[in-house]
Image: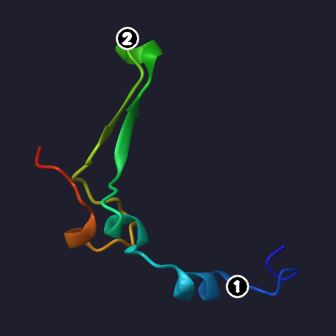
Amino acid sequence: MLDTLKTSVDGLAKCFDVSFYPNLGLSRGVFFAKEHFDEAKVVNGNPRKVICDDIPEELNNGKDI
């Protein structure tokens, strides 16, 4: 499919702005499903760094535990 679109994963990676969402004040979140936690809820500000995360640690907008 990418060949058909004349693009590549490397090309997309070069154009991806890793600071786009952090600069909007957004952060990662964790979803807690109602069937497991009696309430459906998204908790934002996850302080953990994700293994494959390209967002620099100082921009992840995480909250202290």
Question: Which residue appears at 28% of the width and 74% of the height?
Answer: 56
Is 44 in front, or is 55?
44
| 52 on left or right of 61 | right
Residue at mark 2: 38
Measuring from the top left, give residue 11's x and y in whole percent: 63, 88
Q: Which mark is residue 22?
A: none
Residue at mark 1: 8
Tell which circle, 2 or 1, labels the residue nearer the N-terminal end.
1
What's the amino acid at mark 2? Asp
Question: Which residue appears at 34% of the width and 59% of the height?
Answer: 50
Question: Which residue appears at 20% of the width and 71% of the height?
Answer: 58
| 10 on left or right of 20 | right
**Marks 2 and 1, how far apart in space?**
43 Å
| 30 on left or right of 8 | left
Measuring from the top left, give residue 16's x and y in whole percent: 52, 79
Q: Are marks 2 and 1 in contact (CB under 8 Å)?
A: no
Question: Which residue appears at 35% of the width and 64% of the height?
Answer: 24
Is 46 in front, or is 51?
46
Measuring from the top left, give residue 57's x and y in whole percent: 23, 69
